[in-house]
Image (cartoon, rainbow, N blue to C red):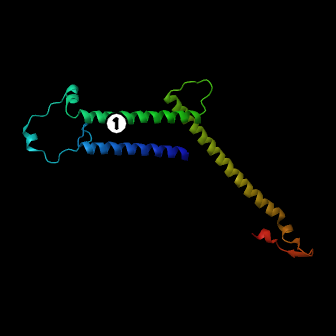
Amino acid sequence: MEKHINTFLQNVQILLEAASYLEQIEKENKKCEHGYASTFPSMPSPRLQHSKPPRRLSRAQKHSSGSSNTSTANRSTHNELEKNRRAHLRLCLERLKVLIPLGPDCTRHTTLGLLNKAKAHIKKLEEAERKSQHQLENLEREQRFLKRRLEQLQGPQEMERIRMDSIGSTISSDRSDSERD
């Protein structure tokens, strides 16, 4: 389970690094091409108040504008990040195939099928763990009961044990030194 958490944390770290990289590029270019990440001006400029609303540029006009180098760099960065994301996802799915018992009848698996089998396998493991924990608790309870029962049965006889010291004489004591600990 800890391995899965570490993998998840590594994935989050990669995403954070990618976001940081994109922010850095965006700051260097001082442009927000998409619009969703740009800030809205706090005070509207007088030029914007009296002018006509800007018309939307067609796709061809956008690509022929002066920011084609920027958009090409952004697109290349995006494509590279997406390629890395897909490769990482493919690697994770391959690792999952090794961990999940799939059965001999299936040679090719869809991602959804693999994830559903993984989910079922996890539920089965959780149920087995729950049963094992319950069984362990029952065995511990039974062990405590049997220890108390043994102490009850041995009670009067164990009060006076006879032990031999190193000289060979006999000494009567309530309990041996090793039993007191």
**Quadrant position of residue 117:** top right
Q: State the quadrant of the C terminus.
A: bottom right
**How many numbered badges does the structure rendering display?**
1
Q: Residue furthest front?
A: 69
Q: Residue at x 80, y 72 (%)?
A: 177
Image position of 164 (left or right of 132): right
Q: Secondary structure at mark 1?
A: helix
Percent coordinates x, y for residue 134 in the rendering: 65, 48
Image position of 180 (left or right of 32): right
Q: Residue furthest left?
A: 50
Q: Residue at x 43, y 46 (%)?
A: 13
Q: Residue at x 89, y 74 (%)?
A: 166
Nearer to us in this view, 128 or 10:
10
**Quadrant position of residue 168:** bottom right
Image position of 127 (left or right of 74): right
The residue carrying mark 1 is 77
Q: Is residue 53 above or below residue 134?
A: above
**Quadrant position of residue 152:** bottom right
Q: Residue at x 24, y 40 (%)?
A: 32
Image position of 35 (left or right of 147): left
Nearer to us in this view, 49 or 75:
75
Q: State the quadrant of the N terminus.
A: top right
Query: Mark 1, residues whose alpha carbon is within 10 Å: few (<14), some, or many (≥20)?
Result: some
Percent coordinates x, y for residue 116 in the rendering: 52, 32
Q: Residue furthest right?
A: 168
Percent coordinates x, y for residue 93 in the rendering: 51, 33
Q: Is residue 138 above or below residue 98?
A: below
Amino acid, disc 1: Thr
Nearer to us in this view, 134 or 40:
40
